[in-house]
Amino acid sequence: MTQPLTRMTREPAIPRLQVITDETVQTVHSHAAVAEMAARGGADAVQFREKRPWTTRERIEVARACLEACRAHGALLLVDDFADVALAVGADAIHLGKNDLDVATARRIVGPGVIIGGTANSYEEATQVWATDIDYIGVGPIYGTRSKANPAPDMGLDTLARICADSPVPVVAIGSITSDRIAEVMATGAYGVAVLSAVVSASDPVEATRHCRAALDAALAARAAEVTRA
């Protein structure tokens, strides 16, 4: 059985480019197919996210298929919401929403070697999340979102920049981020981005992921150049 990574071997620990799987925004590709195409296109990690009322057995079966796809291309697998599913398949990480398990309980379930991400929809929420035993914060929705029935208000780049400036843990931005928007998102100081529609709704998800990868790498290179000049 595939074992989760340990904290001592997690470098680079936090994935900068996450692609979130989906079968409702689009109905052409399965979760596992999205995972395979995103990993092949250069995503650091794939986040298996399924909000429908599936059984635990169904979630484990699909998460395991996503993990195999990720492993084949050197990507990590994050499981959204369900610590028991992450533990069952040996996922590398979990991402917790505001109404999910608290971080301390999730940590007891998955152990010290699994990356845990949390969610913040405002600066105030971010301060609460980074005060826990969290490894990174998923912040947004930056430009809004079409993937949730009752989304939080658009955050915008100014609030994102404030969170990035003060957060002691990496900040991963999310919310209608496209390859064309990655440069301005990363200019706020974000550590990375998570994308959904930009990849899963594309006619060629592999190529769409490659565009996001290229945009992210270019933004990181530009940031490094600025630091060198300073």
Image (cartoon, grey):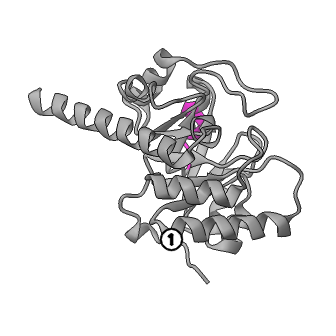
Seen from the viewer's position, the closer of residues 47 and 211 is 211
- Residue located farthest toward the front when viewing the structure as drawn: 203
Q: Residue furthest left?
A: 229
**How far across and how far down the image is residue 220, in percent?**
29, 37
Q: Which is more toward the observer, 158 or 212?
A: 212
Q: Residue at x 89, y 62 (%)?
A: 55
Is 75 drawn above or below residue 202 in the view shown? below
Image location (x, y in percent) of residue 124:
59, 25
What residue is rendered at 60% in x and 44% in y? 118
Q: Is residue 96 left or right of residue 177?
A: right
Q: Is residue 111 left or right of residue 28?
A: left
In the shown orientation, is residue 222 left or right of residue 215? left
Q: Amino acid at mark 1?
A: Ala
Which residue is found at the position 40% from the left and 43% from the top? 213
> Can you identify the residue that label 1 sits on?
72
- Tell me if I can see residue 54 in this picture: yes
> Would you say residue 91 is visible in this rendering?
no
| Classed neighbour count for the residue bearing mark 1: other residues with Cα under 10 Å, few (<14), some (14–19), many (≥20) | few
Q: Nearer the viewer, residue 147 or 141?
A: 147
Residue 195 screen position, x and y as percent: 56, 39
Segment tinted magenta in the rendering: 126-132
User: Which sits in the foreground, 56 or 198?
Assistant: 198
- Picture quadrant where residue 121 is located: top right
The answer to if 131 sits in the magenta stretch is yes
Q: Residue furthest bottom?
A: 1
